[in-house]
Image (spheres, rainbow, N blue to C red):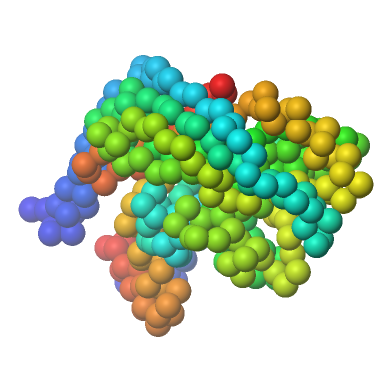
Amino acid sequence: MGFSGKAIELARQATSLGVLVSSVLIMWKLWTLLSGSDSPVVVVLTGSMEPGFKRGDILFLHLNKSPIRSGDIVVFNVDGRDIPIVHRVVMVHEQRDTGEINFLTKGDNNPYDDRYGGIYANGQLWLQQRDVIGRIIGFLPYVGWATIIMIEKPIIKYLLIGILSLLVISSKE
Amino acid sequence: MHSVLYRLNTLITLAGFLLAVMCSLASFTDTFHVPSVTAHAEVLKVNRFRKQLTGNDEVSLTLNVSMNLRSTFTWNTKQVFVFVAAEYETAKNSLNQVSLWDHIIQDKGHAKLEAQITNKYPFIDQFGKSANTNMYSAKPYMWEAIFVVRRSNLFSTGILCPRQVKQLKTRW
């Protein structure tokens, strides 16, 4: 193969990698759109919802405008922290004039609600509808351990990305 | 003829496809399941009523609850979460729901309950500080209160499947 042949080959590989990455991105964005949630898949990081959800389970979420009610399991972010927390709503107060909903959450396996347990920010008493990332529609056990390992040992993440890229490029024989 | 990688690829794809089919079938067996639940809750007495330092009202109750949730359990049910909540309106809030007690049931054998319970969680009303009027106007609602018992089903199968989380709400 001459020089131009090599260049074509390289361009071909680069294009197929580009197409792969783009299609993954498109599918992810579509999923985000259909579920209504910015983060349609989360990993359970703590044992606070056992025996229902264990650490390492992944949860599929969806979000709609229907009001939060007692008993709902919601996934939320506390202002200033970006770890998603999965807990159940135990108290709801909906104001008459504004329609604003304040609610309190608690993990099934926790003895205290999230105010007392230190989950909320300092002085925060309630959550609002806007704090909610989504409600659960399904879950897949154990698969989330991959994410947990990659978060706790980032070197494995870089290793994996490196290996995958190599495989994609070298698979075009 | 075919490389190891090619064979592995085919194998994994086939396994994935079969798994997906089995998971759908497993979920399907539950779509037609209609549980018939009986439950009853009533307030036996009000133990204590006081105003907190923050101005909110707090009540402690003893409730009589009895329920039969056996029909909610299928071969595919992982857990049933039962709770009793007081639902009422006040002058300021169009809707208030306060969870008083909850319980997790993991198998059919434990699905029938009859108990006298005091509220597990403090029953505190928001904005109670407006000179007692809120809680007192809420009181008549409490006696005929709608106790919302809701269950959350986590369906599971023996194989690694994405599982459905279903929520059904029944009110008494």
**Residue A139 left/right relative to B92:** left
* Rendering quarter of residue A45: bottom left
* Rendering quarter of residue B140: top right
x and y percent of residue A134 in the render? 60, 47
**Residue B101 left/right relative to B72:** right
x and y percent of residue B51 in the render? 79, 53
Q: Compare residues B17 and B99 and report the one nearer the observer.
A: B99
x and y percent of residue A57 in the render? 39, 55
Q: Compare residues A130 and B36 and report the one nearer the observer.
A: B36
Image quadrant containing the C terminus of chain A: bottom left
Image quadrant containing the N terminus of chain A: bottom left
x and y percent of residue A144 in the render? 38, 60
User: Seen from this angle, which residue lies furthest left?
Assistant: B1
**What residue is shown at x 64% (from left), y 39% (from top)?**
B46
**What residue is shown at x 76% (from left), y 33% (from top)?**
B139
**What residue is shown at x 73% (from left), y 60% (from top)?**
A125
Q: Compare residues B82 and A155 and report the one nearer the observer.
A: B82
On screen, A145 above or below B92? Answer: below
Residue B108 visible, this angle: yes
**Residue A106 left/right relative to A168:** right
On screen, A8 above or below A3? Answer: above
**What residue is shown at x 53% (from left), y 44% (from top)?**
B118
Residue A29 visible, this angle: no
Q: Compare residues B28 and B17 and report the one nearer the observer.
A: B28
- All told, the count of numbered labels is 0
**Residue B72 left/right relative to B86:** left
